[in-house]
Amino acid sequence: MVNLVVVSNTRQTLREICANLDAMEESIEVTPIEGGLDDLANIPAHQDPEVMILDCSGGGCGQLERVEQLRQLYPDMALILVSENPAPDFLLGAMRAGVREVLPLPATTPSLAAALGRLVRKANGAERRRGRILTFVGCKGGAGTSFLAANLAFVLSERAQKVLLLDLNLQFGDAALFVSDQKSTKTIADLAEEIHRVDAAFLASSVVHVTGTFDVLAAPEDPARALAVKAEHVDTLLRLARHQYDFVVIDAGRGLDAVSLRALDHADVIYPVLQLTLPFIRDAKRLVDAFRSLDYSRDKVRMIVNRYQKGGDIGLADVQKSLGYAAAHVIPNQFDAVASSVNQGVPVLKLAPASTVSKALLDIAATLTDIESNNVVRGGWLGRFLGRS
């Protein structure tokens, strides 16, 4: 089943294109959207369309620069433009925007099938980055979520991976301070306020470049500006960032709201962070229950026990008994190394590479970077779908 989105300002054209797609023998799940490019927020967060048919008649595409931004948000998506009698200037502009299929209206079933076939031949053998999204969420305040998210992001970047640390603890986020003393000139709130301009270049100009492979997009300094960031903005940023980075590590803070839920929806892995005390176990149970109600798979959730030391009243076995999840990773309690790292704003791996905390973070990174197949997506999906590749 291929996810295909049809976008048109004209209801009749939308119906005709959808009817012609339904007439094809192949299995296609069609999502019709009546509107223009500004209405693409209606695409569900979990659904990255594999094909989009965009009606450009009557100025439905707006500026072709917007089409180019669209291709950066969905670089794996095949884009087909349809228009009434497309002029040579329009065709040239579409080519410059990266579009390779422009069809005249009416878009008949044979013309649509032929266009898909041509896209198959262009897609086969192509390689694109499709980074993994890792979302950290604290089971309770003071869990050490920001420290772990920031430091794991740095460790991953040291393993020759391109990594973005995204601070979604919007009101009181300070993840950047754990790994850098550089001052951010732009924050996620700035991008949210100009979301219509966001593309790869705009994102790159907004992050703090900590190293050549490690970037940070900071939370706003003013807690009031957190209101500028909406769930649909997170959709746009994560769809773009996934194709610019090998890993996007998110500090989602504590609590579930529309913004953090969207980060959890997009996540390939969710890391709830807890400590072995009764209040943490109680709140972790509530969080796990919420994950079940959201239909998150068990494989997606990996518990991290932070500041662990043997001999406490609550042990690792109690975590599995209470939550139904074993502790996937354990971070030892090594106060001196962590305190020095936090106070100096230097990653713990850099400051104390031999510490048990650094070793634990390296172990987590190893479980992620060994799965190379998730970092690159090869073309050929259309061919498999159509049976022609």
Image (cartoon, helix red, strand yellow):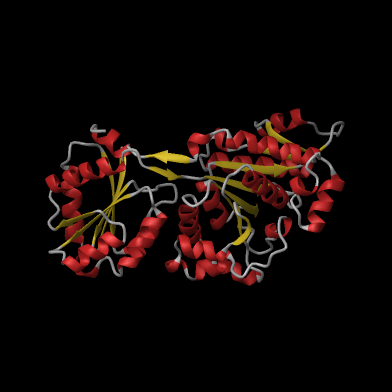
Determine the image quadrant of residue 363: top right
Measured as percent of width and height from the top left, residue 130 is found at 46, 45
Q: Is residue 276 visible?
A: no
**In the image: residue 259, left or right of residue 17:** right
| In-image side of 308 versus 30 (left or right) | right
Quadrant of the frame with the C terminus: top left
Front residue (pair 31, 26): 26
In which quarter of the view is residue 356 placed?
Answer: top right
Q: Quadrant of residue 173?
A: bottom right
Residue 186, given in percent of the width and then of the height, sits at 59, 69
Please name the residue shown 20% across and 50% down the image: 18
Residue 47, image x, y percentages = 40, 47
Q: Is residue 48 visible?
A: yes
Write the residue at 29% across / 33% down. 384
Task: Tell me the quarter of the image containing the N terminus.
Answer: top left
Asked if residue 81 is positioned above or below residue 63 in the image, the reply reads above
* Residue at left offset 67%, top offset 44%: 155
